[in-house]
Image (cartoon, grey):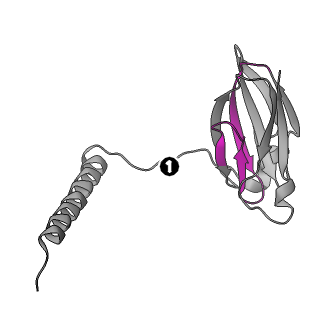
Amino acid sequence: MHIHKLEKIWLTIGITMLFVFLAILGVSAFAMGVKPPSEHHHQLDPAKVQETAPFDNPGLHQIGDNEYEAVMTAFTFGYAPDKMEIPLGATVNFTVTSQDVVHGFAIPGTNVNMMIVPGEVSHVTHTFTKPGEYLILCNEYCGGAHEYMKTTITVR
């Protein structure tokens, strides 16, 4: 069997890269102890979301100087609370969960974009530096009338 010189070069490069990748993966996993973030402790019973703190009191709560925690729940066709008003320049720590199915949580024009899984608590932080009305959309198909699932944040 004849293999062209360029094919041998590319095979050598490919096999070398595969061994380099496996070596880096092995060293990081076994020597450095790096592992995926699968053991987080932000779980709750989806059937008891409205009875479980902090989701028993959804809304915007001030936790520091110009820093807020937005506790929200996603459910079929909506979010709770329905609307929020945030001061300009505030940093908002979103704490969101779902009580029924998988939903999305995205604010177009920002870096806020996460999946909301029932029984899991998702977190993302964003600082609102421009005034206006921000739309929060569900970007995961969650059932019929999914396209109506939204809420707004007003930044003043």
> Where does the image place residue 96, in percent across and percent down from the top left?
72, 42
Q: Is residue 66 above or below residue 145?
A: above
Q: Nearer the viewer, residue 22 or 137?
A: 137
Label 1 sits on a secondary structure element that is: loop
Magenta stretch: residue 18 in it?
no
Location of mark 1 (residue): 39
State the residue in front, 67 or 30: 67
Is 134 in front, or is 3? 3
Compared across the picture, whether 36 is left or right of 95 comes to: left
Residue 91 horizontal side relative to residue 134, left or right: left
- Residue 64 % position (x, y): 69, 16
Q: In the figure, 117 relative to 73: above or below?
A: below
Closer to the camera, 101 or 39? 101
Q: Would residue 110 be counted in the magenta stretch? A: yes
Residue shown at 64%/39% (left/top)? 123
Which contiguous range is marked in magenta? 87-114
Residue 19 visible in the snapshot: yes
Q: Residue at x 79, y 23 (%)?
A: 131
Q: Quadrant of the N terminus?
A: bottom left
Q: Amino acid at mark 1?
A: Glu
Residue 8: where, in percent of width, then height? Answer: 14, 70
